[in-house]
């Protein structure tokens, strides 16, 4: 797989950054558990200049809050997406990217169109079978348990860009 062409990352949320489980309180607020190592990988990508997007059907403002603290600009956090290709194309256009320069990670049927259009489509080991068939790479890690970290770190290491700068990290986060 040619990781050298990847200039940006885009992700689904549920089943990718999470194990797919969602808690709901009596007011209808949804709660998710995110893996801290996956979150750190996003910060490394942002810190090292990779445009990064969240494209999710989820609508909870907690998703936005989570990724704003990871350095993503609000306009790159797409909530309530029903046709993910629309948001993916917007992200590429705004950042001057070709679809083949983006790695996308998704786990379920609404992700397939973007996975087939992007440069490298990745899914967690516990993705649905249709997504596994569409993916360029099936991670050894499940959603919410290292798939994001493994994918981002692999690309950045292949490009010699997995570099941690403590001063820059402190300034940005």
Image (cartoon, grey):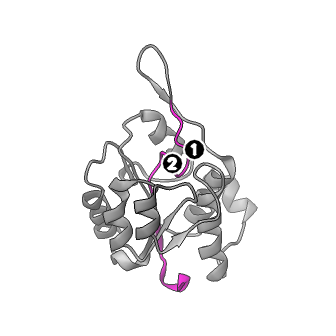
Crowding near the residue tagged with mark 1, few <14, some 14–19, many ≥20 C-alpha atoms within 10 Å: some
- Compared with 9, 19 (above or below) is above
Residue nearer the viewer, 167 or 114 = 114
Front-most of residues 148 and 6: 148
Q: Residue at x 48, y 84 (%)?
A: 5
Q: Residue furthest top?
A: 26
Q: Residue at x 61, y 59 (%)?
A: 147
Q: In the visual, does 165 lie left or right of 131?
A: right
The disc placed on residue 116 is none
Residue at which label 1 appears: 19
Q: Give the alpha-carbon distance from disc 1 to disc 2, as whole Å.
A: 5 Å
In the image, what residue occupies the spot 30% across and 48% down? 81
User: Which segment is the magenta one?
Assistant: 1-22
| Position of the N terminus by quadrant | bottom right
Residue at (55% x, 49% y) in the render: 17
Question: Percent position (x, y) of residue 94?
Answer: 31, 66
In the image, taking residue 50 as reference, residue 95 lies left or right, namely left
The tally of labels here is 2
Residue 4 in view in this figure = yes
Q: Disc 2 on helix, strand or loop?
A: loop
Tell me if residue 48 is in the magenta stretch: no
Q: Is residue 171 above or below residue 100?
A: above
Q: Are marks 1 and 2 in contact (CB under 8 Å)?
A: yes
Any part of residue 52 in sight? no
Q: Residue 15 carries which label?
A: 2
């Amino acid at each position: 797989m040619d990781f050298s062409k990847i200039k940006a990352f885009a992700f689904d949320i549920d089943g990718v950054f999470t194990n797919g489980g969602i808690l709901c309180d009596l007011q209808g607020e949804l709660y998710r558990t995110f893996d801290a190592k996956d979150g750190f990988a996003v910060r490394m990508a942002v810190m090292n200049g990779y445009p990064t997007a969240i494209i999710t059907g989820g609508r909870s403002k907690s998703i936005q809050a989570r990724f704003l603290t990871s350095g993503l600009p609000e306009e790159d956090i797409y909530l309530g997406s029903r046709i993910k290709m629309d948001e993916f194309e917007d992200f590429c256009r705004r950042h001057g990217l070709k679809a083949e320069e983006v790695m996308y990670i998704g786990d379920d049927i609404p992700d397939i169109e973007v996975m087939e259009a992007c440069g490298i489509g990745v899914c967690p080991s516990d993705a649905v079978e249709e997504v596994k068939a569409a993916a360029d790479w099936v991670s050894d890690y499940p959603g919410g348990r290292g798939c994001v970290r493994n994918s981002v770190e692999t690309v950045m290491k292949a490009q010699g860009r997995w570099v941690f700068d403590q001063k820059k990290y402190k300034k940005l986060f």
